[in-house]
Image (tube, grey):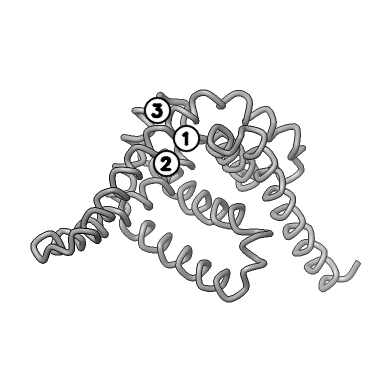
Amino acid sequence: MNKMSSVLYNILEWITRFAYLQLIWVLFTLVGGFLFGIFPATMAMYAIIRTWLRGDTEIAILQSFWKFYKNDFLKSNLLGAILLVIGAIIGLDLYYIQQTGDTLLSWTSAPLFAFMILFLLFVFYLFPAFVHYDLSNFSIMKNAFFIMLIHPLHSLLMLLCLGSLAVIMYIIPALAFIFGASTVSFITMWLSLHVFNQISKKG
């Protein structure tokens, strides 16, 4: 196999991995009735990607996914419930501001929007921290929040990468269906793992 064929084979292999992981994520999300399946399925997906990034690309994906899904089912759903409550509060605030049309209240929409962006960034650090650190949910949330604040360059790079990805998938919606969740997870896990390694070296 020449060099070009080897590169092409590796690209196709990774495309297959991402598509397969996305399919398993969807299936296991549905197994949990969506509401109780999406958080353990997402955490399992991040755990698989973390394993890939740490060098073990030959991991048995389905068996490992089921193990992570089962072991973290309760813990991830408890964390997910907290995120849903916060998200619901933000959504209700935005809805209230839009419905009232009050000029004074409209001034609050800008900081609320900024808070929403920070919350999304926090979530993108939270999932990698969940699978990387063996801590309580409260400690994981605290670590993710402080890591987000003290590494603004990584946070900015994360927003740029995800924003670019969103544009691409908006233009080609089929890509979002086949690779959307797995690609977002890969990007956020890769950047977060770089931060985690920096922290461990300093420690």
Tell whether label 1 touches label 3 (CB within 8 Å).
no
Please give the label number shown on residue 147: none
User: Residue extending furthest bottom?
Assistant: 171
Taking the spot 33% from the left edge, 45% from the top edge, the residue there is 147
Dot 2: within a 10 Å radius of its alpha carbon, few (fewer than 14), some, or many (20 or more) residues?
many
**Position of residue 138 measured from the top left corner of the image (x, y, whole percent):** 34, 28
Tell whether label 2 touches label 1 (CB within 8 Å).
yes
Q: Estimate the spatial distance between the alpha carbons at disc 2 and disc 3, rounded to whole Å.
A: 10 Å
Question: Circle 1 — which element?
Answer: helix
Question: Circle 3 — which element?
Answer: helix
Can you say whether 79 is above or below 123 in the image?
A: above
Toward the viewer: 99 or 56? 99
Q: Which residue is mark 2?
A: 126
Q: Quadrant of residue 1?
A: bottom right
User: Which three-letter amino acid code belongs to the residue tagged 1?
Assistant: Phe
Toward the viewer: 41 or 196? 41
Taking the spot 24% from the left edge, 50% from the top edge, the residue there is 93
Q: Which residue is mark 3?
A: 137
User: Residue extending furthest right?
Assistant: 1
Q: Which residue is mark 1?
A: 130
Q: Estimate the spatial distance between the alpha carbons at disc 3 and disc 1, rounded to whole Å.
A: 8 Å
Question: Circle 2 — which element?
Answer: helix
